[in-house]
Amino acid sequence: MMEVMPVASQPIYQFYAELKDYKPLIWRRFQVAGNITLAQLGYVTMTLFEMKGSHLFHLEYSVNENMPDDDPAYQSEPDKILRYDIAGGDSFPETMISNTYAATEMTLRRFTSRGDATFHFFYDYGDGWEVVLRLEEVFEDSELPGKELPRVLEGQGFGIIEDCGGPAGLEHLREVFQQKSSPEYQSMREWLGTSEVDLSVFDLQDLNFRLKKLPRIFRDLYEYDYPPTKHSIDLLDRKYCKTN
C-alpha cells in the first residue's frame, strides 16, 4: 500500500483517465491522496491500465494546455512542456534538462491545488502508449480512511496488452480474438497463453484490490531497482485468490 497521511489532513484528488487513440474507449475515474508524488501517480496509472512495469515512463504537463483561455499569455507565449521522469534531468540531453524534473520529488499537492489540471502519461516508447489524466476536483473527506486510497470509482474496458504494438496493435489483437479464424489467431494464442481475450472486461473489485498492491511493487522496481519477487510476479499475472 502506498504511504498516505490521514485523509483528514490530506486533500483528495479525483482524476478521469483515458487511454488515447483507442476505440472503444478505455477509461477510469479514480482518487488518490494529494501527498503522493508524480511517480506514484504514474504507478497508479500503470495499475489502472494493466501495464506490467516492463518499460520506461514519464509524465508531461503542458503550461499552455493548463492555462485559462482568457490569459493574455495563452496565445502570445510558446508552449512549455514540463516533463517529470523517474530518472530526473541529469539523465537527458542538454536540450531537455531545463524542462525535465524528477517525478519522485514532486507531489500532487505541491504541483497544483486546482481542480482542472491535465497530465499526459507516456509508457513504452516503442509501442507508444499515452493516457490523458484530467484532474476533475480536489476536495476533503474526513470520513474516508487513508487505507481506502488509491481507489477506482468506475471505468470501462480492460486496459493494454504489453508489447502488442500500441493502440493500433491492440485493436488488431481484439479483432483477431473476436474472429478466431485468421492465421494469426494460433500464434497469438500461444504468445498470450490463452484462447480468450475480452478487452471489454472491467472488474472494479479486482482493480481496487490491485491498487492496494501493485503501486508499491512498481515503486520498488523503478526507484530502488529491486527485482520483483515471485509473489510480486504472481500478483502482476493475477495468480491469486481474490478474497476482497
Image: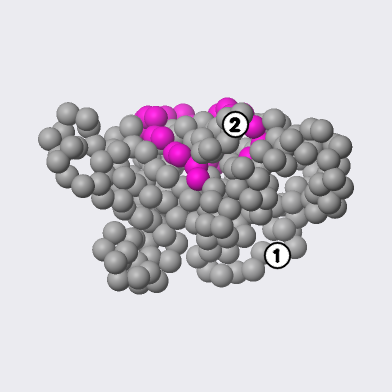
- In this rendering, position of residue 204 left or right of residue 139: right
| Label 1 sits on residue | 229
State which region is magenta.
130-159
| Residue drawn at (70%, 64%) of the image | 229
- Residue 94, image quadrant: bottom left
Which quadrant holds the C terminus?
top right
User: Which amino acid, by three-letter code, is at mark 1?
Assistant: Thr
What scheme was used to colour the molecule?
A: one colour
User: Which amino acid, by three-letter code, is at mark 2?
Assistant: Lys
Residue 156 on the magenta span: yes
- In this rendering, position of residue 165 left or right of residue 223: right
Q: Can see residue 206? A: no
The one of 101 and 4 positioned closer to us in this rendering: 101
| Label 2 sits on residue | 23
- Kindly state the secondary structure of the residue where label 1 is placed: loop
- Kindly state the secondary structure of the residue where label 2 is placed: loop
- In this rendering, position of residue 132 left or right of residue 1: left
For mark 1, does the 10 Å Cα neighbourhood hold few (<14), some (14 to 19), or many (20 or more) residues?
A: few
Direction left: furthest residue: 72
Residue 204 placed where, x, y %? Answer: 65, 31
Residue 184 on the magenta span: no
Q: Can see residue 190? A: yes
Relative to 88, say whether 14 is above or below: above
Residue 230 placed where, x, y %? Answer: 75, 63
Relative to 14, say whether 191 is above or below: below
| Residue drawn at (58%, 36%) of the image | 22
